[in-house]
Structures are given as C-alpha cells and as structure tokens.
Amino acid sequence: MSEDYIVKNTGEVLDVTINRPERGNGMSDPMIVELADLVEKEGDKVRLVVLRGAGKDFCVGRASMGAPRPVGLDALQTRGISDHVFRCYGIFRKCNAPIMAVVQGQAAGFGFALAAAADITIAADTAQFSIPEFSHGIMPTMVMSSMIDRVPMKALMYHVWTSKVISAEKAMEIGTVSEVVPEAELERTAQAFIDRMLHFARPAVLAVKEYGVNAQAIDMSKAVGFARSLHALVNSAGEMKRAGHK
C-alpha cells in the first residue's frame, strides 16, 4: 500500500486509515482504486473491515472535486472515467465481511458516500456530512448510487439538490449513520463494536451481511425463503455449534 493509507490486518480485522490529514483525507482516483483493490483482496478473509480517516476529518471527498473535466470525450469514454468510483461502492457491497466506518469531522461527497456504503457507521456528534457535487456543477448520480438502498428518495434528492451540510444526528435520521456518540467516546465505541464482532462465530457475522445486502432486491416470499435456507445452512456449521448459536 502507498503512504496514503495506514493498514493493519490482524487476520480477523482489516483496519484501514486514510492518511492524508493535511488535505482532509481528500482521495485521488489512484487512492480510490487502491482502497477498492485492498478491500477486494483482503476483505473476504477477515470478519470485519474498519475504515477511518487520520486527523480531524474522515474524508472531504475526491481530490479532483471541481477540477475541469476532460473535453472531447464520447459517452463511453466519459463513463469509463468514473468506473473506478462505482467499482469501489460495488466492492463495499460485495465484500463478505461487514464494513464499519468511523467518522469524525467532515464527510463530504465521496467521503459521505463511503460512510453511507459501509454496513455500520459510527459518527462523532461533531461530524458533518454533505453532498456538494451539485454546487460544483457535477452530476451527483455517483454518490447517489452509494445511498440509493439506504436513504429515502425524497431525503436523498433534497440533500443532493441543496448541498446542505448536515449533522451526524440528521445523517442518522436519513439512514446513512448507525450511531452517534460524543466525539471523546468515538474510538471507545468503535472498539467495543469490534470486540463484539470478534465474539461471535464468523459464519453468523458474514451471514447477516449476505442477507442484508441481497434480500432487499427480491420480493417478500423469496426473501423469507432465502432467510430459511441461509438459517439452516449457517447453523449447520461446526463453528456455530461450538459457539452455541441457534
């Protein structure tokens, strides 16, 4: 990994810290590719991925925000420019292990999208969230795609169109944050969640992610059938029996 990240992998937890605090952890396109590659390669081998930002901010967005766009490209070439961003969101969803974001300070644009795409997001009560793309003349459908299965449409469109900076409490209200805690308790709360996840049998942890991601896209009868099959399959695992899960 480059110096843009601090990575710790215990074999159980993959802990990734965006390490550009002097730039608010704004992420270049190569950094986005690097993050996606890491989660794709290592995320399925652990039981939890943790994403943090060094310094006072989680991530202020893409480093190229507001930069002039290339001219003279056809539609296919234009679409290809952004594919690495969509790929990153997709890898977050497809990763077998749940992903937890620990958010302080600013989470804007791509930073807000990462926080929303994570399965669990714990935020400091002083954190602020925003989708500033519209204000920069940028089509916001990339960041919208990271939230489309998490945020009610009326709320999503409103925050996209207004580019309002919202509090952690408001972000939790619209479904992009799981828990808001005092800033001084952020790391303690995150560690408590990590410890809890390590307590449970890995098949159960991964099954919750699998069901949560996939069941939303199917109708109710199929979702129930999926739950029944997954319940029977996972509970038959030896690790589940040893852990006393039912």
Image (cartoon, helix red, strand yellow):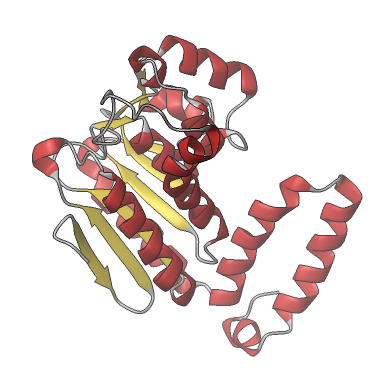
Looking at the image, which is closer to me, 91 or 128?
A: 91
**Residue projecting furthest to the front:** 72
Q: Quadrant of the N terminus?
A: bottom left
* Residue at figure coordinates x 43%, y 49% from the top left: 84
Q: Quadrant of residue 127?
A: top left
Looking at the image, which is closer to me, 160 or 141?
A: 141
Residue 106 in the image: above or below residue 213: above
Q: How many marks?
A: 0
Is any atom of residue 201 visible in this view? no
* Residue at figure coordinates x 59%, y 86% from the top left: 239
* Residue at figure coordinates x 20%, y 36% from the top left: 57
* Image location of residue 18, percent across then percent down: 23, 51
Q: Quadrant of residue 155?
A: top right
Looking at the image, which is closer to me, 187 or 225?
A: 225
Residue 221 in the image: above or below residue 110: below
Q: Quadrant of residue 145?
A: top right
**Residue projecting furthest to the right:** 221
Q: Quadrant of the C terminus?
A: bottom right
* Image location of residue 65, percent across then percent down: 29, 28
Q: Is residue 202 left or right of residue 20?
A: right
* Residue at figure coordinates x 48%, y 18% from the top left: 160
Is any atom of residue 56 visible in this view? yes
* Image location of residue 47, percent across then percent down: 46, 71
* Image location of residue 194, percent across then percent down: 38, 62
**Residue projecting furthest to the top:** 162
